[in-house]
Each structure stands twice: as structure tokens, then as C-alpha cells.
Image (spheres, rainbow, N blue to C red):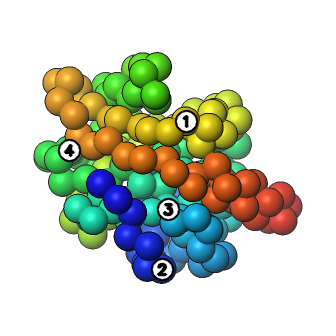
Amino acid sequence: MKPLFALILVAGTVLGSAAATAQALIDKGFVSGWNVMVDPAFGNGCLIQTIYQDRSVVRIGYDALNNRGYFVVFNKAWGDLKEGQTYDIRFDLDGEQFNAKATGFYLDRVPGAGVFFEDREFIHAIAARKGLTVYNAEGQRVMAIDLKGSAKALDYARKCQAAQG
């Protein structure tokens, strides 16, 4: 899968069940194939997002409300996830595998799974890798993505977050 390099903005959705309503993401620019945005639903947490040719959407960002980081993958291959329900998933970063609990939600009727982590620096560990592969609870591959450009884009997101206060 290769990212679409056109500037594509997608209406923001709630990534956690704590927020009651979805709010539009605020565009902060386009860096190395990724949109840099602010999400008001996460206390003006900054994030990067890219959209792939198969219409998969990947977001990596900061939840400023809960002082944590997250990544989320929207992809039809998730199947029938329930919004707000947690799921066991596995993800692989350049051969290093991690088991995680993901929360289900939807973006424009496309299922997504988001992983939240307390160590916000883990975001930068993701960006330092070349590829991310995500597997569902049954061990089936949902998607594999190239993380090219994510380190530079996350540097902008880090500066964006510092500017949010």
C-alpha cells in the first residue's frame, strides 16, 4: 500500500468513548505524506494521518485530555467491530511484536481499532520503524503499512502539541 499524497482531510471522529460528540479535525499542514492535525475531541491533541490507496486511514497522535498517545487503523478488513468494545490485537514493528487491547470505533462506516498507551514517547518509537503490520484477534493480517515520512511528520506533531500549551 502506498499513501495518497494529495491533501485529504477526513472529518474527525471520537476515538474514545469518553467524548460525547465528534468534532472536526483542524488542519495544520502536510508533511512527508502525512496530514498534521489537531483533534479538539482529545483536548486539542495533535496527530498525523495518512490515507492509503485501499482507503485505509492511519492516525498516530496525542490524547491531551488523558496524557497518552495512540495509533488507530481504520480498515474494512477489521470486519464487524463494535464501537467502544475492546479487542485483543497484535502489531508488529519491523519484526518486534506487541500484544495490545484496542478499542473499536468507526469513521464514515469503516471500522477502526485504536490502541492507547500511557508512554507518549512510544509514538516516536513507532515513527523510528520502517513498517507496521496489524493483526486481528484471530491472527489474520488486517494491514501492513510503510511508515515512511512518519518520523518527520511526528516531529511536526510534537511541535504542534507543544504549541497547544
Q: Which residue is mark 1?
A: 129
Mark 2 near mark 1, Cβ–Cβ under 8 Å?
no
Rendering quarter of residue 44: bottom right
Q: Nearer the viewer, residue 92 or 112?
A: 92
Image location (x, y in percent) of residue 71? 49, 45
Q: Assess disc 3: are there few (<14), some (14-19) or many (≥20) residues with their C-alpha within 10 Å of its C-alpha.
A: many
Q: Which residue is mark 4?
A: 78
**Disc on the earlier residue, 2 or 4:** 2
Q: Amino acid at mark 1?
A: Arg
Earlier-in-chain disc, 1 versus 3: 3
> The C terminus is located in which quarter?
bottom right
> From the viewer's perspective, is residue 139 above or below residue 41?
above
- Residue under label 3: 49
Residue 7: which disc?
A: 2
Image side of residue 115 versus residue 1, left or right: right
The answer to which image quadrant residue 45 occupies is bottom right
